[in-house]
Amino acid sequence: MKCLELIFGAVICVLLIKAQTLDDPFDENEVDFLDNYDDYQAGETRAAAIPLNNAGSEANFPKLTLTLINPADKAQIFAFTYADTPKILTHPWFNWRLQTLIYAFGFTENMASVTTQAIIDAYFKRGGFNILIIDWSAYSGTVPNDYNVAVGNMKAVGGLIGGRLSSIFTRAMLRRMHLVGHSLGAHLCAYVNRGIPNNLFTERIHKIIGLDPAGPLMYDVALGNKPLSSSDAEVVQVIHTDMLQAGAPFKSGTIDFYPNGGGINGIQPGCPIFDKANLFIPGNFCSHTRSVLYYAESVNNKENSFAATRCGNYSDYLFARCQRQNQQMGFNAKDHEIGDFYLQTNSFAPFDRGLAGATYLFTAP
Ligand SMILES: *[C@@H]1O[C@H](CO)[C@@H](O)[C@H](O)[C@H]1NC(C)=O
């Protein structure tokens, strides 16, 4: 029963039991109606986007875990299976007073990937966050041919995790969480939030940060995939670094950053020339990966780091035809400054050029 799973359940259960005598709001047969009504109010089509077939059943994803990082030693991890996720709340590494980061890696990635480790390192160093990784490495694919399977798994895994989060975390905890994802993991974050019922008793996560959301298959409307978009959370920050190849080809958030043009003009500075003859060599993912490295660096940066200019397009930025705006890419972004923002980075770490990055410089390092 739903109310048994609620942590701050006492008061809500009383309300629920009272409501059940009149009209059970969680009656199996009425859940669809409630979902659809909420969608209707929110102007969304969420219900249709979640896979509702057997592929979305937890039995098909026995190796899916939410993995908690030890706040005293980032090399120590504790993987909670889907069934065990409620135990996160009582685990000694989990601190109720802190915010929680939930990170989702992308296609073919895992806990050991450079990107995953960069995010863990950054939040670990910063402190103040419980760090949870959605470890879907058993389903994220191992070879290029797995991509379409990974897309299907991504949607199912997102829906499963979303449903789980909403039954184990309180509204207050969900409200303060950050969902961060790279590549297919960025879309996974969107499916997580769509999987959280939108009603009086739970709450969707307010902030999603998409690090170069995956482009292939995700923007083909005919395939029925629903990419991360500005409607998936109150704040959807997207960092575009490889729009021509692996990344999303379009604006996709409430706040979109295009460092060095977002890759629409080619590779990120410091990355090797894209090798079209050998698509899956590591060098070809340099620009795509930069989204994570820029973001990870921003987690420990202070005021004025990764300063960015609001601009209608890249050429206006190049020719300084835009007004400077008070926005910063990454962790320190101002949630209310919405729109498209351009900036320049260094070619190698540290990538941050501070305030200088808000203005294009032909001779930047
Ligand atoms: C960029 O936007 C400006 C208007 O601000 C427009 O005049 C210009 O043609 C645009 N450039 C491109 C390449 O789209």
Image (cartoon, grey):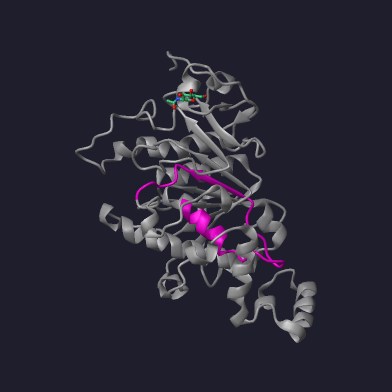
Is 20 located above or below residue 135 in the figure? below
Report how many numbered discs are placed on residues in the image.
0
Q: Is residue 67 left or right of residue 138?
A: right
The residue located at (61%, 76%) in the rendering is 31
In reply to whether residue 192 is colored magenta, the answer given is yes
Q: Residue furthest left?
A: 277
Question: Quick check: 289 above or below 179?
Answer: above
Q: Identify which residue, 83 or 144, lies in the foreground.
A: 144
Give the residue at the far bottom of this rendering. 21
Q: Residue 47, how many percent across, how many down? A: 53, 66
Foreground: 292 or 124?
A: 292
Q: Locate residue 12, reporting x and y percent.
A: 77, 73
x 38%, y 46%: residue? 215
Quadrant where the C terminus is found in the figure: top left
Magenta segment: 187-216
Question: Camera-side residue: 174 or 39?
Answer: 39
Is 283 one of the magenta-colored residues? no
Specify whether 38 is left or right of 181: right
- State whether residue 232 is above or below residue 361: below
Task: Residue 164: give x, y in percent of width and height.
Answer: 57, 67
Q: Is residue 311 left or right of residue 290?
A: right
Q: Quadrant of residue 300?
A: top right
- Location of the N terminus by quadrant is bottom right
Residue 105 lies, in percent from the top left, at 44, 51
Q: Tell me the quarter of the picture where residue 96 sits.
A: bottom right
Q: Is residue 91 visible?
A: no
Q: Is residue 35 above or below residue 44?
A: below
* Whether residue 43 can be seen here: yes
